[in-house]
Image: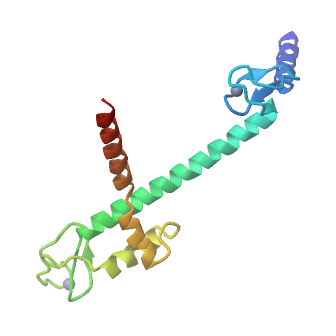
Amino acid sequence: MIGAQTTYNRWKRRRTIVVCAGCGKDHPVGTRFCSACGRDVLLPAADYEKLQDAKFDHEQTELAEKCQRNAAIKRIQALRQATACGHCNRYFDPPAQFCTSCGADIAHQLLADETIYAIVQPEFPRIIHSFDDYHGLRMSAPEKGVMRKLIFRTLFRFQRT
Ligand SMILES: [Zn+2]
Ligand SMILES: [Zn+2]
């Protein structure tokens, strides 16, 4: 029972502590400025936890969206390699030489943009709402952004030395 009381007291002390919203350092109640970063945003520990939870949830949502976006781009890239049959409209994920449905020679008959959109849109309804979105997704691939950043960083470093 003594152990439980001690735990409760510790818990109560933690509840009455204030935490810096900037760097997370805790201080006794009544502190006005953070000793570590000088900020004046000091929150009760419980509120700080709520803030951290909200931040975490936001980050998780952003990450999930980024993953979905990347998956959509990968799917589009894969479908651009897919082959379509001009006779029976069947499509095959890996490039095929002959249609397995009607036997037509379908080499080099790649999927039309409209067909790719029709396949990808139902797979990623939250990411791609319209044909314009689909084109935008292809233009603004995250890989391009990363590449641009790397190039700029390299140029900047090169200029400084
Ligand atoms: Zn701080
Ligand atoms: Zn066919």
Residue that extends furthest to the bottom in the rendered view of this protein: 87
Residue depicted at x 31% and y 36%: 159
Residue depicted at x 43% and y 78%: 131
Horizontal arrangement in the rendering, residue 42 relative to residue 143 (left or right):
right
Task: Place residue 105 in its image quadrant.
Answer: bottom left
Q: Nearer the viewer, residue 146 or 49?
A: 146
Is residue 79 depicted above or below 59 in this figure? Answer: below
Q: Nearer the viewer, residue 59 or 96?
A: 59
Quarter of the rendered image showing ligand 1: top right
Q: Nearer the viewer, residue 8 or 79?
A: 79
Horizontal arrangement in the rendering, residue 22 relative to residue 110 (left or right):
right
Horizontal arrangement in the rendering, residue 29 relative to residue 142 (left or right):
right
Residue 88 x, y percent position in the rendering: 24, 87
Residue depicted at x 85% and y 13%: 6
Is residue 123 depicted above or below 1 in this figure? Answer: below
Is residue 132 depicted above or below 148 in this figure? Answer: below
Q: Quadrant of the C terminus?
A: top left
Residue 90 x, y percent position in the rendering: 26, 81
Q: Quadrant of the N terminus?
A: top right
